Image (cartoon, rainbow, N blue to C red):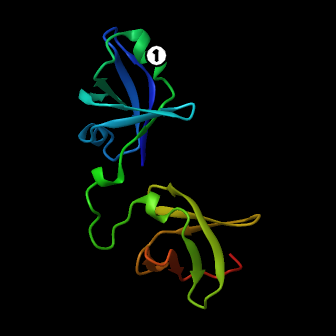
Amino acid sequence: MNVGQVSGVFGVKGWVKVFSFTDPRENILQYSPWFLQKNNQVKEYKLIGGRRQGSLVVAELQDVADRDQAAELMGSEILILKQQLPKPESGEYYWADLIGLDVQNQEGIRLGTVDNLMETGANDVLVVVDGDTERLIPFLQQSTVIKVDLDNGLIVVDWDPDF
C-alpha cells in the first residue's frame, strides 16, 4: 500500500523529507520496514527514526548515511505491506480497498468503478468512472452508500444514474 513519497532531503546525515498520505501525517513513522519504489525497482529500508517537521515528516532510514544517498531516493513511493496496517473497525475501510470496486444503485443499475477517492473537508467522495462518464458520489454510509461488500467487489449506493 502506498502511504507516502520521499519529497526531498533533510540535513546532511541522510535524512529524507516525506510527504505522508497518513492521517495524521506522522503516523507514517509507525510502519517499518518501508519499501521504496522508484523506476519500477523496489528496495526495503528499515525506519530508524523520524519526526513531524512543519507540514512534512522527516525520517532516518538504515543504510542511508549522507545527503547524496538521500537525494537518490527523492521521488520514491513509500509502500508498506497491507499486513502492517491495523485491521479496520466494522464500517471502516481503507481507500485502497474501495478502489476498483463496482458501484451500482439500489435498482441494480451499474454506475461504474471506483477510480479513486477525494477529501472535500465535509466528507470523502467516491470518483466513479464508467467509460467517459465520471460521477462524484459522497461516501456517506447509511445515506448515500447503502452497502460495501468487499468480498463481492461491490458498493451499493442511493444514487440516480442521471447524476
51 horizontally vs 10: left or right: left
Image location (x, y in percent) of residue 130: 70, 69
150 horizontally vs 134: left or right: left
Please rate how many residues cluster around mark 1, counting C-alpha atoms within 10 Å: few if below 14, some from 14 to 19, many from 20.
Answer: some
> Which sits in the foreground, 88 or 158?
88
67 horizontally vs 52: left or right: right
> Which sits in the foreground, 161 or 38?
38
Image location (x, y in percent) of residue 10: 36, 16
* 162 versus 118 height, above or below: below
Q: Can residue 145 be seen in this view?
A: yes
Q: Residue at x 46, y 57 (%)?
A: 96
91 horizontally vs 136: left or right: left
* 16 versus 36 height, above or below: above
> What residue does disc 1 label?
71
* 72 versus 22 height, above or below: above
Q: In which quarter of the image is residue 56?
A: top left
Q: Can residue 122 be seen in this view?
A: no
Q: Which residue is drawn at 30% across and 44% down?
A: 24
Image location (x, y in percent) of residue 151: 43, 76
Residue at the farthest right position = 132
Q: In which quarter of the image is the C terminus?
A: bottom right
Could you tell me which secondary element the residue under label 1 belongs to? helix
Image location (x, y in percent) of residue 137: 56, 69
Say how many tags the image has.
Answer: 1
Q: Residue at x 52, y 81 (%)?
A: 156
Q: What residue type is labelled 1?
A: Ala
* 23 versus 147 height, above or below: above
Q: Residue at x 31, y 40 (%)?
A: 28
Q: In which quarter of the image is residue 22?
A: top left
